[in-house]
Amino acid sequence: MFWLLVPLAYLLGSLSFAILLSRLSGGPDPRASGSGNPGATNMLRVAGRKLAILTLLGDLGKGLLPVLVANLLGLDIRQQAWVGLAAVIGHLYPLYFRFKGGKGVATAAGMLLGLYPPAALLALAAWALTFVLTRTSSLASLIATPLTLPLLAWQQPAALLPMCALTGLIVWRHRSNLRDLFAGRERHF
Ligand code: G3P
């Protein structure tokens, strides 16, 4: 079952809600405006609050669903984490959009919510606090994601390896944000 769920999770993760919703609404393509990222943050910049919230929910749901299904089918937490990671990889490198996807934060949040809700709550609190203080979505993501690792190492060590891989991928996908943050030209709200 595990080897069936991994590709299915990848195919689900490949559905980019930012791109699909912008097409359905006839709005601007998030890949061509704002930061160029097909994600909820950039949808808020270029398409407004309603589509940003729908993007957030869709991207979060596609991380959550495969983990819940894996759980229901009796897979252990280590396998659930790999299935969730496959969904995040789908978001980062989507089959349907020439492998050019987003940065994975909302999908990772959904995955974490299914896997171990206290870690998702910790990430949400860290994200919200950083965002309120700095008004910078990328910085909030870059702080919140690795913060979950010590908690997971302590409470869910079996999920640590896929979560380390996920954190590395998310940081890698934020490399242009990191450059802009260090250069003092990152976008704020
Ligand atoms: O979740 C994406 C966020 O961390 C950064 O998005 O559009 O500011 O590059 P953006």
Image (cartoon, grey):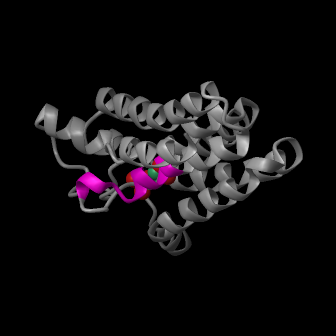
Compared across the picture, whether 5 is left or right of 140 comes to: left
Q: Position of residue 177 (x, y in %)?
A: 48, 65
Q: Which residues are magenta?
A: 86-97
Q: Specify whether residue 7 is in view.
A: yes
Q: Nearer the viewer, residue 20 or 39?
A: 20
**Residue positioned most to the right:** 154
Tell me, yes or no, whether the highlighted magenta stretch contains residue 93. Answer: yes
Question: Which residue is at a point 32% across and 43% down the rendered structure image?
Answer: 15
Question: On the image, which quarter does residue 44 sit in?
Answer: top left
**Residue positioned most to the left:** 26
Which quadrant is home to the N terminus? top right
Tell me, yes or no, whether the highlighted magenta stretch contains residue 125. Answer: no
Q: Position of residue 93 (x, y in %)?
A: 37, 59
Position above or below: 27 against 183: above
Question: Which residue is at a point 63% across and 58% down the rendered structure image?
Answer: 167
Q: Nearer the viewer, residue 43 or 116?
A: 116
Question: Which residue is at a point 39% across and 29% down the rendered structure image?
Answer: 53
Q: Please tell me whether the stretch drawn in magenta is mainly helix, strand or loop.
A: helix
Compared across the picture, whether 114 is left or right of 178 comes to: right
Q: Position of residue 138 (x, y in %)?
A: 52, 55
Which quadrant is home to the C terminus? top left
Q: Specify whether residue 188 is in view.
A: no
Counting every numbered tag in the picture gives 0
**Residue positioned most to the front:** 1
Q: Position of residue 6 (x, y in %)?
A: 50, 47
Question: On the image, which quarter does residue 20 sit in?
Answer: top left
Position above or below: 47 against 91: above
